[in-house]
Image (cartoon, grey):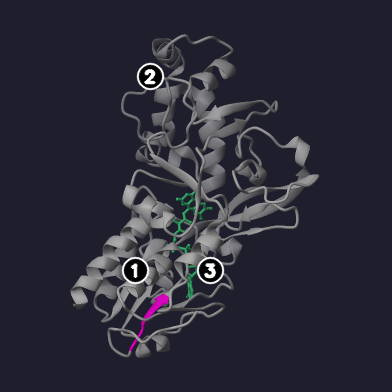
Amino acid sequence: MNQTPSLHGPRPVLIVGAGFAGAVYGRTLAEAGWQVEIIDRRIHIAGNAHDAVDANGVRVHTYGPHLFHTQNKEVFDWISRFGAMVPYRHSVTAQLDDGRLVPLPVNRRTLEILYDVSLPDAEAVNALLESVAQPIKNPANAAEHLLSRIGPTLTDLFFRPYTRKMWGLELEDMDASVVRRIPLRHDYTSDYFPDDTYQVLPRDGYTALFDSILDHPNISVTLGTAFDKAMQADAHWCFNSMAIDEYFDQCFGALPYRSIRFHTQTRPRDQIDGTAVVNYTDDGPMTRETRWALLPSHEVDRGPDTTVTLEEPCSYEENNFERYYPVKTADGRFQDVYRRYADEAARHDRLSFIGRCGTYQYLDMHQVINQSLVQCRKWIDSQS
Ligand SMILES: Cc1cc2nc3c(=O)[nH]c(=O)nc-3n(C[C@H](O)[C@H](O)[C@H](O)COP(=O)(O)OP(=O)(O)OC[C@H]3O[C@@H](n4cnc5c(N)ncnc54)[C@H](O)[C@@H]3O)c2cc1C
């Protein structure tokens, strides 16, 4: 990408990471006249939102399905500047042991299928749940909370195996707050994100969207390049989306993450229908599968075969230190460690940590975009 001289002095701004955080900062700074150099140690742009069309003619998201959903019009308008969007309202089914598929989150239809009853209204749903719930007065953990609300059948089917696989934990070892907000629908709504006004996918994929975001004369992108502290010397400022504990050589200890191993399979196209994402309820190692062809604009070239990706959660040590989900324990001990790193970072000049791993929090794409837009604009104002 070509560069024009910066309006803000000779030294560029260095951005570490070409995911949403880095790309939003990069574009916002470039439009304000800053010269921006973005590096990423991967050989592709788009961070964890990266996608590509595979040999079956299907667009596959390299790091698991990325579904864009938000209530924030400004964020939606911002990404819409960089590529056409297609509407997609996400819904999920869960596969039972006998192969039947039921809606997830649990709704009235799920209960009717599982208990083989007809539930004419929300009152009937409540009556059923009351009849199966256990009388636990002050639930002490996630298991007790679920048992007191939905009883053992639903708890053991939808929550116990998932929690074990996803977090490597038993429900008894998790705080009740983790499951308190899990939705349970008294109607037939199967929307996974019922409150989000804007639910779309980029028509030409996320990678093309990032190509367009980063296509600005003030932006240069260098891939396959890991951050080195010496790079900061030539930069006016460094916005860094790498893991904050890695930057500080884990001097206060490691900030752990859960990770996911992705297993890609080829299946006959005519065997694929229903929802794009199916969750497994069994005790095996996989949590879910994504049938890419069922997402709009993802079946680029339909042939006899298609691609399905299965997800196997693991610790990040078991997956080449790929950091996906910050680990939240009931005692919040890793958030305490993170705060020590954040305090240390605040003592460094011309350095800000951004994005998911820079701030050690799980953030959806719309949250990263919003945070990055707000904070970057504030920074630009502070420099004038
Ligand atoms: C499995 C999974 C599914 C998800 N599904 C959804 C979804 O459906 N909807 C949704 O809204 N969000 C989803 N997300 C969240 C979404 O991925 C994040 O919101 C988004 O990727 C955060 O952007 P980021 O820039 O902070 O991080 P990233 O996308 O991770 O980008 C950070 C970049 O920094 C680079 N980097 C790190 N360290 C260095 C270094 N030392 N030197 C150079 N470069 C470095 C990395 O290579 C990476 O490319 C999902 C996340 C995961 C893991």
Q: Where is residue 332 in the image (x, y as percent from the top left)?
A: 33, 53
- Disc 2 and disc 3: Cα gap in Å? 52 Å
Q: Earlier in the sequence, mark 1 or mark 3?
A: 1
Q: Which of marks 2 and 3 is nearer the N terminus?
A: 3
Q: As rendered, which of 337 and 108 lies closer to the eye?
A: 108
Label 2 residue SS: loop
Q: As rendered, which of 90 and 311 lies closer to the eye?
A: 90
Q: What residue type is labelled 1?
A: Thr
Residue under label 1, please give it. 28
Q: In which quarter of the image is the C terminus?
A: bottom left
Q: Which amino acid does label 3 sit on?
A: Ile
Residue under label 3, please give it. 45
Q: Residues within 10 Å of mark 3 (few under 14, many from 20)?
A: many
Q: How crowded is mark 1: few (under 14 residues within 10 Å), some or many (20 or more)?
A: some
Q: Is residue 14 magenta?
A: yes
Residue depicted at x 50% and y 74% = 40
- Disc 1 and disc 2: Cα gap in Å? 54 Å
Image quarter of residue 341: bottom left
Q: Is residue 149 visible?
A: yes
Residue under label 2, please give it. 135
Q: Position of residue 83 (x, y in %)?
A: 49, 57
Q: Give the range drawn in magenta.
A: 11-15
Label 3 residue SS: loop
Residue depicted at x 41% and y 61% = 356
Mark 1 or mark 2, whichever is nearer to me = 1
Instruction: Classify 210 as above or below 16.
Output: above
- On whether ligand 1 comes within 8 Å of the CB at mark 3, the answer is yes
Q: Residue 5 carries which label?
A: none
Residue depicted at x 42% and y 58% = 81
Mark 1 or mark 3, whichever is nearer to me = 1
Q: Position of residue 309 (x, y in %)?
A: 66, 49
